């Protein structure tokens, strides 16, 4: 839709004429913040508080005005005092688009001395979304509503709580004093200095130690009636986990793992956390927009990301708690101690946090194989997102709050982490680590750009090992400044292979590529297969690479353990040889991660038209002997796309489904539902994956088993095993004979399980599996009905569970969205949830009718601007998918020997790997 897109571009560029950036003139050094949260703020009667901030700052040039941030809707300035004496009346104004507070000064000031500005204001707590200083609540054991006040300042929300220079490079020292009702638990980044309780007024005033030099977005405050449990100290760092008292027993996992993870990071970075910060508090917040937030010394989490019940919560959540803690702890160095200069460089935060999320946890808990899980969960997801034409580069400019938000993407997190992992393997771990240690000490309490990182790492490259074709800064330039990544074509000729590159686009369009690509490889005769991940050679821009092979070579496979961020296309001859190897004894030594790499590449190369589908399906039929989790995870993602496109209930869909079930049979038998191994994380991941797919595709004994477990739960009250619950709940509803009775049974169990968030979200994600459209409509209506029991933070999960649960759900969800988009925009929490809804939903469309209705909807409604952009993208996705079907359907028909027929109306869809859908939703950390 080129016309529509042109229009959007115009609108956006007009808006951007205003500057959202502060002039490069002010250097704040110290903030003294005073907050007064009255007792009414902890009820539903008032959202108001009083604030006063005193800011000391320098200027770099003479000026007669000060520009800082304050959000007009949350901060009402009452009084501004310059330099402690001059009251400025009417000499300030807030721009309600850019959030910039302009203060005119009575005199021109210059760069020789420090000035101060005191701003007194009335603040408003947010109750609608979970940004700024906001109110959350929970029901205590007696069913009484308890309110708490907490913060989420990243990226641009500190300005909602107090006037400040709200940019990451403007680091300062912060002091805080707060006055709150007596008896509340008040946590800030640092420890208390003192507190004074007045029994007459019922108010306590607390003063905190000043913070280290830090940016505004990392400040945090939690005022609640929570209790805390202390864990082991790490050196001189005290450690505690806090949550509503009823959930105290579920803090244990975080109490055990947190200190180990922090100690592992202390060790890896060589920089003791205790040097900069005196404590580490972890707090579970009942309503939370992101997954967790790395506030320095006071990390906040969704309850599902920190509280875990050994009897009731699955291993998926055990892994989530461990990895989210590691992610947030890694930020204490990468983000808190050393901060990107601007949000355009946010991958320096999120890429490192994603990298350590997996690899630090792997160090502490090696049996979970997170080094391998990284490849299928992060790297493959990044390769998919980064194959879209409009993917943003790791470094790309942004200035409005909406643009900044959109940088918190799979690219920044997963591609960021994958590219850093590639650098680690190019340099080798020890050199990488030494380089990072230098980086942290060089830039502590300061800000960086990627060049600063590459320069320091470059000093630690041992070139005899890495064989760098240029310095690291040059090598990394295209990986970070351009979007996309290469696909390597490997051309076999005699005893040589020639390797060339182009950009990989999922649309199939061909673009040139000029990356510096590290090449590691294994040939069939190598004894030490796939072990060495440092590059054997480099492919450099504008030239090919030729490798001479030993004479007895059967095959060559590039990219050992997929440490490089690219795909490989081998050409027919070599693909055939690889297929033979995969069917050989022990897969001819091809490791499970390289098997997952091959499977993921094949499905995506076919989707982009670079490999013929029949060849892909022939090759992946080796899976009949495959029982490893990793290649199966990739294979089922690939098959999922096919089923979504052709519709699971079409003849073709049914044929593909029975093909999958046939290939899965060894996998399924390797993880029987009756054999539980709760202590083996990879086993339970495999079991959940196999059961979810087998049941979804209608395997009779799977369906029978889960229905049996569900009726046992109904009759005895004994819940299924914690790791089986998502599969049992979902499929019991999907194949129910008593839709309403079973659905309401589970809905009531949701209402009654307020004590445990992991159980609640497991049930919510399963309730969309029913195929009863009336129930599905009622369910979606609950997300926009006050008091229904569904929290705004969970509304999106409900919507996803409906459209991904069944073909019927797609139409119900679409109808609901069209009918209620204005209400949804205000009720669904989180940034641009409408946009996420419609692009997610559109991926499941399969009929021209759905596409036509979407087009109509966009044309005939006056949609909000953000939503219009997303809706345009959604339409593009749906149209691309429809084209895919036209292009490839015949290949599939032929492959499966089906009678070619235009009348098999493709109208249904299948969705995401169960179990992982909910995790995908809240990955921003
Ligand atoms: C500071 O003042 C100097 C001299 O007037 C001028 O050249 C420079 O551009 C100014 N810098 C800023 C950031 O305004
Ligand atoms: C503001 O205060 C600083 C020191 O506190 C002083 O040096 C400076 O002259 C004052 N500036 C004005 C314009 O009053
Ligand atoms: C923003 O400011 C403009 C001009 O001062 C005003 O007309 C408009 O109503 C304001 N919008 C809001 C949401 O306050
Ligand atoms: C619940 O109510 C009982 C009786 O009024 C009281 O003793 C108990 O402290 C209450 N529990 C909570 C968590 O408020
Ligand atoms: C006040 O300080 C005392 C002594 O340090 C401490 O026990 C108490 O918990 C503090 N009160 C609050 C409300 O933080
Ligand atoms: C408590 O507050 C009251 C009312 O503001 C005041 O009169 C009294 O002096 C305070 N008491 C203490 C111990 O500060
Ligand atoms: C904690 O230990 C670090 C070094 O291990 C030290 O630099 C820091 O000063 C200590 N902090 C406190 C509060 O003792
Ligand atoms: Zn993060």
Image (cartoon, rainbow, N blue to C red):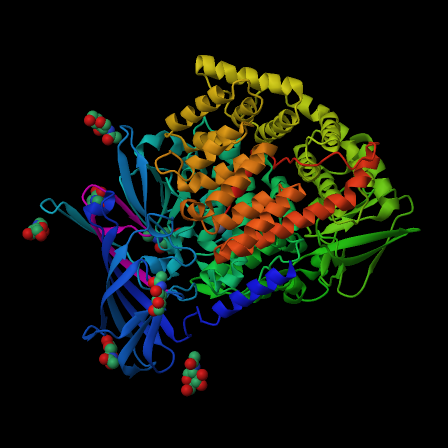
Furthest residue in direction right, as rendered: 494
> How many badges with numbers are in the image?
0
Residue 339 among those drawn in magenta: no
Residue 188 among those drawn in magenta: yes
Position of 887 compared to 421: left or right? right
Q: Position of residue 424 (x, y in %)?
A: 62, 53
Q: Position of residue 361 (x, y in %)?
A: 53, 41
The answer to whether 907 is drawn above or below residue 502 in the figure is: above
- Residue 100 shows up from this direction: no
Q: Position of residue 672 (x, y in %)?
A: 63, 20
Q: Position of residue 824 (x, y in %)?
A: 44, 45
Position of 320 compared to 563: left or right? left
Furthest residue in direction top, as rendered: 715
* In the foreground, 433 or 292: 292
The answer to whether 50 is drawn above or below residue 784 in the figure is: below
The answer to whether 205 is drawn above or below residue 214 in the figure is: above
Which quarter holds ligand 5?
Answer: top left
Q: Residue at x 38, y 57 (%)?
A: 157
The answer to whether 92 is drawn above or below residue 576 in the figure is: below
Kindly indicate the quadrant of the structure image that contains residue 652.
Answer: top right
Position of 250 compared to 203: left or right? right
Q: What residue span does the magenta drawing correspond to?
A: 172-194
Task: State the predominant SS element of the stretch in magenta.
Answer: strand
């Amino acid at each position: 839709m080129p016309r529509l897109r042109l229009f959007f571009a115009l609108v956006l560029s007009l808006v951007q004429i205003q500057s959202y950036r502060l002039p490069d003139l002010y250097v704040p050094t110290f903030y003294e913040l005073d907050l007064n949260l009255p007792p009414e703020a902890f009820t539903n009667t008032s959202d108001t508080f009083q604030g006063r901030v005193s800011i000391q700052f320098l200027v770099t040039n003479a000026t007669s005005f000060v520009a800082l941030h304050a959000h007009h809707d949350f901060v009402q300035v009452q009084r501004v005092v310059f330099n402690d004496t001059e009251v400025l009346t009417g000499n300030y104004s807030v721009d309600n688009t850019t959030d910039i507070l302009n203060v005119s000064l009575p005199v021109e000031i210059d760069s020789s001395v420090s000035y101060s500005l005191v701003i007194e204001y009335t603040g408003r707590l947010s109750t609608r979304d979970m940004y700024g200083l906001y109110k959350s609540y929970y029901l205590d054991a007696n069913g009484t509503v308890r309110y708490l006040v907490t913060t989420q300042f990243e990226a641009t929300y500190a300005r909602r709580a107090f006037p400040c220079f709200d940019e990451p490079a403007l680091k300062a020292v912060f002091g805080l004093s707060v006055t709150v009702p007596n008896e509340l638990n008040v946590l800030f980044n640092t420890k208390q200095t003192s507190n004074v309780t007045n029994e007459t007024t019922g108010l306590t005033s607390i003063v905190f130690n000043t913070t280290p030099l830090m940016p505004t977005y990392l400040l945090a405050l939690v005022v609640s009636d929570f209790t805390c449990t202390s864990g082991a100290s790490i050196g001189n760092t005290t450690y505690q986990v806090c949550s509503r008292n009823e959930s105290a027993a579920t803090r244990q996992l975080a109490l055990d793992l947190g200190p180990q993870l922090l100690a592992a990071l202390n060790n890896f970075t060589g920089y003791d956390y205790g040097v900069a910060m005196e404590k580490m508090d972890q707090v579970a917040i009942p309503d939370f927009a992101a997954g967790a937030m790395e506030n320095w010394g006071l990390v906040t989490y969704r309850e599902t990301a920190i509280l875990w019940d050994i009897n009731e919560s699955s291993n998926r959540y055990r892994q989530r708690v461990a990895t989210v803690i590691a992610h947030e702890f890694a930020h204490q160095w990468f983000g808190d101690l050393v901060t990107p200069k601007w949000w355009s460089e946010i991958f320096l935060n999120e890429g490192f946090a994603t990298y350590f999320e997996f690899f630090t946890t792997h160090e502490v808990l090696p049996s979970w194989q997170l080094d391998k899980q990284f490849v299928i969960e992060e790297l493959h997801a990044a390769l998919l997102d980064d194959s879209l034409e409009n993917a943003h580069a790791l470094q790309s400019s942004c200035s409005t709050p909406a643009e900044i938000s959109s940088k918190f993407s799979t690219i920044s997190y997963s591609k960021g982490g994958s590219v850093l992992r590639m650098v680690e393997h190019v340099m080798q771990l020890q050199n990488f680590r030494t380089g990072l240690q230098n980086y942290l000490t060089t830039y502590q309490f300061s800000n960086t750009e990627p060049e600063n990182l590459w320069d320091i790492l470059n000093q630690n490259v041992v070139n005899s090992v890495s064989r760098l074709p240029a310095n690291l800064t040059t090598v990394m330039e295209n990986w970070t400044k351009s979007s996309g990544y290469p696909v390597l074509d490997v051309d076999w000729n005699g005893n040589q292979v020639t390797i060339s590159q182009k950009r990989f686009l999922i649309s199939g369009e061909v673009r040139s590529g000029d990356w510096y690509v590290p090449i590691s490889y294994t040939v069939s005769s190598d004894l030490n297969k796939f072990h060495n991940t440092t590059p054997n050679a480099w492919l450099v821009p504008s030239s090919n690479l030729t490798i001479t092979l030993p004479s007895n070579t059967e095959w060559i496979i590039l990219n050992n353990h997929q440490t490089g961020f690219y795909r490989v296309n081998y050409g027919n001859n070599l693909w055939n040889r690889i297929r033979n190897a995969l069917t050989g004894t022990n897969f001819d030594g091809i490791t499970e991660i390289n098997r997952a790499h091959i499977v993921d590449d094949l499905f995506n190369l076919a989707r982009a038209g670079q490999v013929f589908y029949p060849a892909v399906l022939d090759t992946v039929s080796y899976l009949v002997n495959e029982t490893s989790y990793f290649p199966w995870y990739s294979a089922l993602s690939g098959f999922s796309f096919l089923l979504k496109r052709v519709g699971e209930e079409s003849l073709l869909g049914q044929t593909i489904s029975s093909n999958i079930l046939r290939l899965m049979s060894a996998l399924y038998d390797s993880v029987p539902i009756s054999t539980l191994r709760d202590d083996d994380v990879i086993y339970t991941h495999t079991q959940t994956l196999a059961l979810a797919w087998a049941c979804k595709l209608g395997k009779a004994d799977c369906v029978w088993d889960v229905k049996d477990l569900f009726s046992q739960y109904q009759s005895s009250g004994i819940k299924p095993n914690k790791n089986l619950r998502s599969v049992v709940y979902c499929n019991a509803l999907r194949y129910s004979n008593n839709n309403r009775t079973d659905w309401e049974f589970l809905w009531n169990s949701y209402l009654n399980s307020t004590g445990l968030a992991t159980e609640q979200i497991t049930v919510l994600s399963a309730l969309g599996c029913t195929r009863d459209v009336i129930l599905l409509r009622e369910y979606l209506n609950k997300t926009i009905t006050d008091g229904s029991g569904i929290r705004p933070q969970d509304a999106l999960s409900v919507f996803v569970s409906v459209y991904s649960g069944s073909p019927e759900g797609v139409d119900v969800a679409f109808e609901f969205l069209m009918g209620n988009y204005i209400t949804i925009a205000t009720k669904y929490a989180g940034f641009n949830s409408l946009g996420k809804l419609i692009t997610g939903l559109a991926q499941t469309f399969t009929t021209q009718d759905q596409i036509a209705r979407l087009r109509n909807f966009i044309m005939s409604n006056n949609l909000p601007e953000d939503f219009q952009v997303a809706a345009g993208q959604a339409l593009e996705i749906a149209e691309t998918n429809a084209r895919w079907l036209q292009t490839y359907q015949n290949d599939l028909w032929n492959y499966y020997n089906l009678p070619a027929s235009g009348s098999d109306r493709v109208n249904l869809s299948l969705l995401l790997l169960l179990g992982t859908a909910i995790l995908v939703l809240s990955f921003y950390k």
